[in-house]
Amino acid sequence: MSVARAAHQKLGDQVPFSPEIPEDHDFLSQAIELSRHALEDEGKTPFGALVVIDGEVVATGTSSVVELRDPTAHAEVMALRAAGGKLGSHLMEGAVMYSSSEPCPMCLVACYWARVSRLVYAATSHDVGVNGFEDLQYYRELSLPNAERGLLEETPVGGESREIAAAALGSWADKLPFPVEPKL
């Protein structure tokens, strides 16, 4: 038995799940199949994702990080990019993201930015981590205050640079047709 399988058995079924709906298994099976087929393509990792709206697959994605030499080309991001192009919008309220694995922090936040309404996944971050991917490490790192993070050096710059950058944000907000609601 592989180390990954042994660790998964040790974890057991301790992961809490939200109620499933009947079509979850069909769409999730499609995402898993995408991840399995990705292994047949040179340089792809086993991740697949679908964006579904009103019971229809709008877009699919597989991890294309190595192929495109793009660290953001994860399956969920690729599916969101394709869906945005097809829908003509970056907002996907009412959409369901089906993913072969629990999304990494970047992909989860991409779902938030797109306003995806629901996320359904199969393998957990634990399963992903056991197989050598850093997702859990990144989730832990992001939970720390900026000054305590250690994976890269963060340098916030104040003074005139901050004022100019903040003014550009303010100019954008002033042009909106509605008042900005601070998200603090």
Image (tube, rainbow, N blue to C red):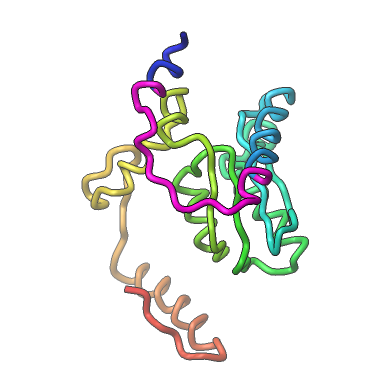
How far from the left and from the top, in percent, is residue 9? Answer: 40, 21
In which image quadrant can residue 70 be found? top right
How far from the left and from the top, in percent, is residue 155? Answer: 31, 52
Tell me what residue is drawn at x 44 percent, y 81 percent.
170
Q: Is residue 124 left or right of residue 184?
A: right
Tell me what residue is drawn at x 54 percent, y 63 percent.
117
The furthest residue to the front: 22
Span shown in magenta: 8-27
The furthest residue to the right: 86
Taking depth in this image into account, of 22 and 41 the one nearest to the observer is 22
Q: Is residue 153 left or right of residue 65?
A: left
Main SS of the magenta part reads loop
Q: Find out whether residue 17 is within the magenta segment.
A: yes
How far from the left and from the top, in percent, is residue 138? Answer: 38, 40
In which image quadrant can residue 132 be found? top left
The quarter of the image holding the C terminus is: bottom left
Tell me what residue is drawn at x 42 percent, y 79 percent.
167
Q: Find out whether residue 33 is within the magenta segment.
A: no
Inspect this view and state whether residue 15 appears. yes
